[in-house]
Each structure stands twice: as C-alpha cells, then as structure tokens.
Image (cartoon, coloured by chain):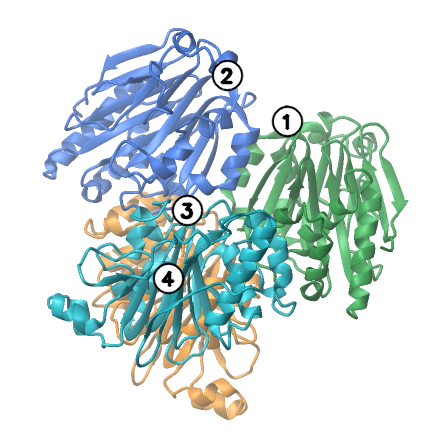
Chain colours: A green, B orange, C cyan, D blue
Amino acid sequence: MCRWLAYSGTPVLLDDVLYRPQHSLIDQSLHARMGVETTNGDGFGIGWYAWHLRTPAVIRDTGPAWSNRNLREIADHVRSSLFFAHVRASTGTTVQQTNCHPFRHGRWLWMHNGAISGFHDLRRDLMLTVDPALFPALEGTTDSEVMFHVALTFGLDGDPPGAVARMAGLVERLGHEQGVPQPLQMTVAVTDGERIWFFRYSSGRDSRSLYYSSRVDDVRALHPDLAFLRHVSEETRLVVSEPLGDLPGVWNAVPESSYGVIQPGQDQLLRDFEPEPV
Amino acid sequence: MCRWLAYSGTPVLLDDVLYRPQHSLIDQSLHARMGVETTNGDGFGIGWYAWHLRTPAVIRDTGPAWSNRNLREIADHVRSSLFFAHVRASTGTTVQQTNCHPFRHGRWLWMHNGAISGFHDLRRDLMLTVDPALFPALEGTTDSEVMFHVALTFGLDGDPPGAVARMAGLVERLGHEQGVPQPLQMTVAVTDGERIWFFRYSSGRDSRSLYYSSRVDDVRALHPDLAFLRHVSEETRLVVSEPLGDLPGVWNAVPESSYGVIQPGQDQLLRDFEPEPV
Amino acid sequence: MCRWLAYSGTPVLLDDVLYRPQHSLIDQSLHARMGVETTNGDGFGIGWYAWHLRTPAVIRDTGPAWSNRNLREIADHVRSSLFFAHVRASTGTTVQQTNCHPFRHGRWLWMHNGAISGFHDLRRDLMLTVDPALFPALEGTTDSEVMFHVALTFGLDGDPPGAVARMAGLVERLGHEQGVPQPLQMTVAVTDGERIWFFRYSSGRDSRSLYYSSRVDDVRALHPDLAFLRHVSEETRLVVSEPLGDLPGVWNAVPESSYGVIQPGQDQLLRDFEPEPV
Amino acid sequence: MCRWLAYSGTPVLLDDVLYRPQHSLIDQSLHARMGVETTNGDGFGIGWYAWHLRTPAVIRDTGPAWSNRNLREIADHVRSSLFFAHVRASTGTTVQQTNCHPFRHGRWLWMHNGAISGFHDLRRDLMLTVDPALFPALEGTTDSEVMFHVALTFGLDGDPPGAVARMAGLVERLGHEQGVPQPLQMTVAVTDGERIWFFRYSSGRDSRSLYYSSRVDDVRALHPDLAFLRHVSEETRLVVSEPLGDLPGVWNAVPESSYGVIQPGQDQLLRDFEPEPV
C-alpha cells in the first residue's frame, strides 16, 4: 500500500503542501493512519510541471521520504501549480527507482495506491496487452506501471476515464480467468498537466481511502486563520490518500467506484466508475 | 532510537536469528513494539566474526533493513558464532553509512541504542577528548561513534566496564556543565570477538529496554518443541533491545543501571553500573 | 560493456582474487584496458557458493565497485571455491540492482559482457519466448537477464552448451528479422556450482576479449615466487574478461566462437561454438 | 581530484550548461582530460539560486553523475542565473552525501578541487580552529568541508579573499609543523548568490587547472554560430576546472596563485593570491 497526493491550483512551494501540513504526506511516509501498512518507506517520487515546460519533472528515489535530503531541498526551492507526490509501501516488489511513482509518459503522470491480486500470474498477459511501441518503456516490475501502459494502450491520451475503465475491465477479466476472485484494488491519479483525473475502485467495492479537498472559499469560511489559504485561488484543490490533518470541513471522501476531474473552471465531482469489459 | 541484537554461541546461519524468529529484529525495523519510535528504517548494520579471521566483517547500509536484499543474502549464506545486528531510527542525525552501527575498531565492535541529550552542543568537547591517534577514525556524526572512541580512549581494550563508566561519567559532567539535566540514555553492547559486555544505563534511571535470553536448557525445558534449540549449545545467549516473540520464560529484563558479560564458561549476570567521574 | 571474472579451485578469500592482483577486477572497474568503455562504474555483483549450502549467495549494488565498502568487507571475510564477479558499464540501460550481474536461478549463476544490438526492438519477442513459469523472475531491463531466462527455457539445466547455442540462434534470427545485421555480442559465464561453462561469440566474429588461466603447475614453473600459487591446487582456474596483471604465460585468449568447461577432473578446453537455429 | 563548474549570467536551464556542451561536466565525470584521475564517479552535487529565495538549493548524491536520473531531471526542468556543479573523485575519503560538494552555509556555497596533504594528521587541529558555533555543521570527513568552515570562521562573510587567504595560511602553517612540505593544493569557488570568488593556489605553485570564459561578445564574434550565445547577456560567465569543448578563444587559464571575482558590473580579473600567515 502507498499514500499519494495531487495538487492543482495557485503555484506554491512544494514544501507548503508536502511538509508543512499537520499530518503531511511526509509524516504519512512514517506513520500513516489509514490502511494496512502504516509505514510507507519503500521509496517515493514527485512529479511537477514547471511553468516554462510541457513535460513534467520526475524525481524518484528508493529510500524513505522522511529522511531524504534531496526531496527536502526540492520542496524548499521549487514552485508548481500542478504536482503529484507518492510514498511507497512495497507489497513484495523490488525497491528500486523504476518501481517508484509517479510514472511518466510524455506530458502524462500516473500514480497508484493498491494492487492487482495475483499480479505474479497476470503480469505476462498484461504486458502482452501493452502496445509494442510502448513496451520498451516498461522499466520496472510493478502492477502500477503496467496498469499505466495498458491504459495508454487503451486510449488514455484521448479519453482517460474510458481508458482506465478498459484497463480495469482487462484486469478483472484476466484475474477471473486465473481464478482470482477480486483482482483489482486501486486509487489512481493521472494528469496531462492541465487536468487531473482521480479514480477510486476495487473489485470487492472496499477501495482504499481517497479524499478531495473542499472549495477554498468554504474552507476559508470555516478556518479563517489558515495562513496557507490566504495565498491560494478558489481553483486550488487537493486529492489525497488520507487527510492532511484533522480540520473538519476540509476533506471529503471520494465515494466507492467513482471518479472526478480537476480542471480549469468547474471541477467534475463526481461520476460513477465501472470497469469496461474488453 | 534503535533496536539491536547480540548473539554468542553455536555457529548459526544469521538468518536463524535475524529473520526467522516471530518478532525478529528485521520485523522490529518496521514495527518495533517498545520505545518511542516504532519504525527503525534509517539504516542498519551487522558485524560478524568469521572462524578464520580475527577482525570482524561489518556490513552497513542506509536504507531500511526490511527491504534490503544484500542483508537477506548474507543472512542466508553466512554462519557465525558471534555477531551483532542493529536497525537504526535516526533522531535527526544524517542517514549515512558511517552513522550506522556497529562501529569497529580493530577486533572490537560497538553498538548503541539511546542518545546524548544536547549532543549538538557537547559534540565538540567529546571529540576533543578522543585520543588524537584515534581522531582520524571518526567518520560520522553520531553520538554513538563518539561514545565508542571516548571509551577506547579511556581504556576499553583493557577494562571495558571501567572505560564505559568513565565515558558515561564524562558525558554526565559535560552535559551538566551545559545545563542538560539528564545527558545520557544508553543501552550498549561491545565485544572483542570473545566476550560481549552489555550495559543499560540512563541519567534519569529510565533506560531503554534491554533483555537477555535465559539459559538454553531452561528454555528447552519450557519449550521442548523449539527446533532452533536442538542445535545450539548451553552456552548460546542473546541480548536484545526487545524480545523476539512472546514465549514466556525466554527473556529477562536487564535491570536499570547494570551490566553483564557473556563469555566462554560462566556468564556474568549482572553487576551494578555507575558512571565514573572524570 | 562490462568486465567479469569466474574462479574455481581451492577455497580462497575473495580478496585474494578480486582486489590483490596487480590489474584486478576492482582496478578494471575504474580503468579497464580493453574494450570500448574504460570505466565500469554502473554497478557490480558477486555470487559465491558457501560450502554448506547449495544455492549461491548474490550481492549486487548500483554504485561503483571501486568505492563500495560492503564489497570490500565481504571480500575480506568470505572464502569460496567457486565464485563469479562482475563490474558493469551500462550501455544506456537503467542503473539498478536488478540489472546487475550475476543473475541467479536456483543453483545457477549467469553473467555476461556484451550486448544484443537493437535490444530495444527485440526485447518483447525475447521475453515472450521465456517460459511463462519463469516470466515472473524477470526483474530488470537488461538483455543479459533475458538471455539467461531464454537459455533456461531452452534447457540450460540439462545441456548448457546446447541451450546457449539455441538462445544465440534465437537472437540471431529475431535480429535478422528486424534488420539488425549483427545482433549478438557476448562473452558469457554460467555455473551450477560445480562446473563453469564459458562462451565467446559474436555475430560479427569480433567478440569482446576473454581469457582463461594456464594450468597452475605451468604458471608455478614460470613464476615460482607467486605467493598465491603456493596455496592453490592444480585444479584452480580463472576465466576473465581481461588479464589480471601482465605476467607472461598466465593468460590464454579464448578463441573466437568457442566455449570451454571448467570442472572437477580434466577441464574441457576448448570447443567450437555456433548458434543453433530455432 | 574533482571537476567543477560555476555559472553566472542570464537564467538558463541547467541542462544547457551541464549536459549540452561538447565536453560537458557530466562527460568529465566519466572522462576528464586534465588531472590525475580521469574518472570523477564518487558523487556529485549542484547548488542553485532560485529567483524567489535567498538560500540556494543543494542536491547531492553518492553515485556517478553520468548515470543519475534525478540530476538529469533537475537539469531539464530548473533554470537559474547562478549555480555551482561538482563531480567528485575521492582520494580515499568516504563516498557519502555529506562529503559531496557544494557545501552550504546560509546563502553561501563552497566547492573545491584539490587536497590538503597529510589531512589525516591535520584534521583535528583544523577542526579545532572552527568556531564552536559552526562546529555542529561539520557533517562529513573531507578537507574541503573543513576548509570552508575555517574560512567562515576567519570572516568569509565580510571579506572572502582575506578569509580564504587566512585559511590557506593556517593550512600552510599546520602542514609545515607536521613536516608536510607542500600542504595545500586548491581551486576553490565560493558565492553568496550575487558574486562568485574563485581561487587557484597550491603550496608548490603547480595548481590544478582552472579556466574562466571570455566575454560573451568576444566569443560571439569568434563563433557567431553558437546558438547558446544568442540568448545570454554580456554579463554571462563560466569558471571551470577544464574547458567545455575545444573552441579556441573561449577559455582562459587562471594564472597560478591568483583569484577573481564575477559580479554585477565589471568582473575583477585577476588579482594575486597569497596565503596570509595566522
């Protein structure tokens, strides 16, 4: 299991979101509250979009986030208006940089919390589904990376919700063929640098936790003393595996089997998500 | 805070002691039960004596022990009759190989759980106490490494309990001079490859936990089904930061402010320990 | 390109072979003399058989061998009668532990110097050839690991020269289908812990360098002052990417397109090697 | 020995300076042309000033620069108008992050190529010279870090050339007291984020190589086709251990025992440097 965070809004120093909150993602790397594994010390990654470039930067490393000095430096010196961050708890897969999230393809970033049950047996068939032109980009051994490349193969670039639904449908089918009763468990975030799509789904309908933040003006009304909110626009939004801190009125659970879109203008909150048979 | 383990007895595969027990040291690296920090993921180390060599091998690395493949390989393929193992939870000091335990000097190994309060301010004076001939050997930034070299300076080679008492006395004096009310918190193990001395002491007399195993024949009588015990001699003994597993009758708390010696023949269990003014 | 070394003979401290020779493998990691890349700093690995166990230990890490302290410790404290060592120069593939040699499967070890031309395009087809039961063991992204698993699929366990010939034949065929004129360049060593098979072959018949050591009694007659030779049996043999030191009469080039077997009793030096069409 | 680079001028993507030039610093990490060690694979570091912050960011890691993906990412996505970069060849000192350059203190950065002869014996006395208030900031074991903190102790903040001269004078005196004939060998760069001071000095007057770039308009006249020069101001300047590429008229050797200052307005090129007795 893992913990992740997606930010979109007013450009901020990554530190403001990654380290400063009371129960920050970095704190969650050491002491997560929700989920089975409370320690997410098997690597980490951040991906951010710089104002002047289309392709995001991705920094990943294998040690725990909580003690990584380079992550601390980047958080203290880099601003961004859209970034992903992820702390990893391996469920047995090798701890190596190429297994750390987020994964990148062109301008796209992908990160995942969850697992494909029986991935050991499904991996080969899933990899074979990946477009041969994308195959050389598979560098690691995680289910997450393969899920991303299957979604890319299934049209992520044009229709993210559809591509993720087809990817989920394939996992369900292959899993069932192998006798896995509940093959998929996922919360996923994916972005093209402008919009963020986030998904909460599992075969057993008991998905890992996922939350999105309330509208900034609503939070500001509830907590007028929050310094951070004075400097961010109404458009600012966070999606997180578990709440940063305990403030009431800030965090809203994403319902089971649903997805949302954070985008310029009105966000899309929320729609049903169902795997699409393939 | 950290967790450590010292083994002396019948040569065993390190795996039998490091990984196999129910609540093993490797398990404690992820989920310690006692102590403030429950995660000891800031590096690890093992030191072992090979039959044909006087100087021990020391393997240390900066990532968590629980996911380290090289540690797993060594544990699976190396036998030893005397070894130390340590998993580290940094209290702010850099995570780097030279800050990992055990520390070595010639045939000596040293490992520590605890801290010098106000070490930031005491470090310089403690380092100045170190014999200039030993000074170049200081490679890291931990209190533990400096404590070892102060003890070496104070005669560890000839009189381990006396040297450790003088080291503790110096820490107490320097701490009090700086206005630190309770400067020292330590459980320490030190060995020359034949005998293991272990110490439990803190200025405030509330030292971190420390346990030693009961005589093998007593444990065997209580737990006749333990496979491990069938192959080890009566002389076999473990000292650990916290018990490996929950078996009753196996683990004995080391009393506050005391020390013991594990050695060929009758072990010395236990004597009072008091810092010696210097 | 990489450099490697295979040792079989009287049990020695790894240090005697890895570090002590004049132009040792560790020296070659920094300054190789032969081959295109003179620096082999993209990771390393050693695999050794311990007397009491069937499966070899494998230690691999991503930094340069020349500065790795843990490698130095193992070399100083571990003895073995059969071991492999490898220093890596990546030709673009990720520097990660799972891309370091030797690779292991059960009691087998495999290491490689060379490359499959156009591997980027051949990787998928080669991976598909791997027995689905072996597929989950593919952890990295090197041609070398895939070559090993293809050879395992083609019967390495029963007939190493045949399996390697069929693997080479497959690479040749797939390469030619993709329009790669000279698909394969390899020097390979493979062992089951008792025998070592070594191969020198390339499509263009200009394979990377490979040498085997002369009979110990012949070397002893030439160089009666070599301390190392006093303690090793007549059976002792080394195969290396490039000679350790400049002593005349010690090193014999393995001819192009040939292979040999080092084994208890008479070694098999040398036979022709040709890819077998598949 | 090491290789380093200091840049000041028009904000550029780090990539334009670190990777793109013909014989770039990253290329020098693998194949330096000048100096004793041709491989600088024992760690690296970069320090840059972001427009909105006073204190520079510092990223350091222990592996070779040439294969480090995170360095590649930062170079591809971070712009700066003043940055330092360093690739390290250890002369025996531990390869660890805290031994990598540049070193930082507040808004200051320091990097060094060279060595103190007999540092093993001088280290203690040099460390004792460091202001006790700065002592806790000593994290590594290099001569370079101690030189920086001695210079800070001797007034770097107010008078960089004087402080460096006094630091050099102390090294000379302590060295001679220990019987070291030529204690110091250094090329140093230091900056406060606005000005860069660079020094070339050695006791034996045979200092390691150091070059500064010609005025941009002069280079542009010589090489009108250089794309990079079209986008940078007249003020842009580089100081490097060895030239990036072979273009005539671009690089000027810094004379033995001299220093310069790169600053807004007219740069100071060059003045004599002599150690100042202390």
Density class for disc 3 (Cα within 10 Å; few <14, some 14-19, many ≥20) is some
Q: Nearer the viewer, mark 1 or mark 4?
A: 4
Q: Is residue A232 visible?
A: yes
Q: Are marks 1 and 4 in contact (CB under 8 Å)?
A: no
Which of the two residues, D263 or C65, is positioned nearer the viewer here?
A: C65
- Residue D99 % position (x, y): 36, 41
- Residue C209 % position (x, y): 34, 55
Q: CA distance from mark 4 to mark 3?
A: 46 Å
Q: CA distance from mark 2 to mark 1?
A: 19 Å
Tag of residue A53: 1
Q: Identify which amino acid the numbered label 1 is placed on.
A: Leu
Tag of residue C85: 4
Density class for disc 2 (Cα within 10 Å; few <14, some 14-19, many ≥20) is few
Q: Identify which amino acid the numbered label 2 is placed on.
A: Ala
Tag of residue D227: 2
**Mark 2, secondary structure of its residue:** helix
Chain for numbered disc 3:
B
Q: CA distance from mark 3 to mark 1?
A: 46 Å
